[in-house]
Amino acid sequence: MFQEIENVKYVKAEGKNFLLKTEEIINISDNELEVIGGAGGKNMIHLLRLGVTSFMTGTEALDLHASVVNVYLSGDEEKAAEIYYQKIMPYFAFYDNYPEELLKAMLYEQGIIDHPEVITPRAKEPMSKIEWREFNWVLDRIGFRNKWTNIP
């Protein structure tokens, strides 16, 4: 489409094998087609290493995602990787299984929304008490309880 339609300028990286697809798109377009990272921020650090500089990741942790991008683009790949692996990746262990529920919970924790409840009908059964306990343990470990945290 990029080669045949004049106004195609952007593509979002999603789906299976999107790292490989991203690299192929960058190569085929000679870096003229801008790839936008997605997938909730998964593989963000790897997409940055491929040359992706813009992301549409969802809203649950924009400050964390922005920190990774800003630190990486300022030239500190190691610090960006540290933030990514220590702050973003831990919550994905739960987030993947309950994205609707945990999106609201995380927005609530940061004071962005007033109520974390998911309105019925629900797409899935709610998380169990043990899953909530462990998810909250993860949020505490990554320092997510702060209102709109400032991460270097």
Image: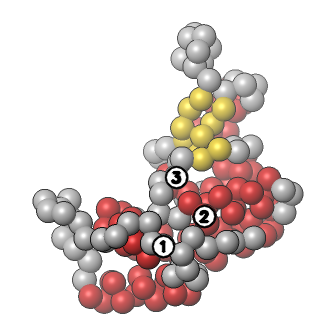
Q: Answer yes or no: do the residues labelled 1 and 2 have beta carbons within 8 Å?
A: yes
Q: Position of residue 125 (x, y in %)?
A: 18, 70
Amino acid type, callout 3? Thr
User: Which residue in the structure is indicated by mark 1?
Assistant: 110
Q: Position of residue 83 (x, y in %)?
A: 68, 71
- At 26% across and 77% down in the image, what residue appears? 127
Label 1 Cα neighbours within 10 Å, binned few <14 / some 14-19 / many ≥20: some
Q: Earlier in the sequence, mark 1 or mark 2?
A: 2
Q: Foreground: 51 or 59?
A: 59
Of badges 1 and 2, nearer the viewer stands 1
Label 2 Cα neighbours within 10 Å, binned few <14 / some 14-19 / many ≥20: some
Q: Position of residue 32 (x, y in %)?
A: 72, 25
Q: Answer yes or no: do the residues labelled 2 and 3 have beta carbons within 8 Å?
A: no
56 to the left or right of 151: left
- At 61% across and 66% down in the image, what residue appears? 64
Could you tell me which secondary element the residue under label 2 belongs to?
Answer: helix
Mark 1–mark 2 Cα distance, whole angstroms, equals 10 Å
Mark 1–mark 3 Cα distance, whole angstroms, equals 17 Å
- At 51% across and 82% down in the image, what residue appears? 145
Q: Foreground: 2 or 54?
A: 54
Q: Earlier in the sequence, mark 1 or mark 3?
A: 3
Amino acid type, callout 1? Gln
Could you tell me which secondary element the residue under label 1 belongs to?
Answer: loop
Mark 2–mark 3 Cα distance, whole angstroms, equals 11 Å
User: Which residue in the structure is indicated by mark 2?
Assistant: 63
119 to the left or right of 15: left
Q: Position of residue 22 (x, y in %)?
A: 62, 39
Q: Answer yes or no: do the residues labelled 1 and 3 have beta carbons within 8 Å?
A: no
Amino acid type, callout 2? Asp
Of badges 2 and 3, nearer the viewer stands 2
User: Which residue in the structure is indicated by mark 3?
Assistant: 57
Of badges 1 and 3, nearer the viewer stands 1
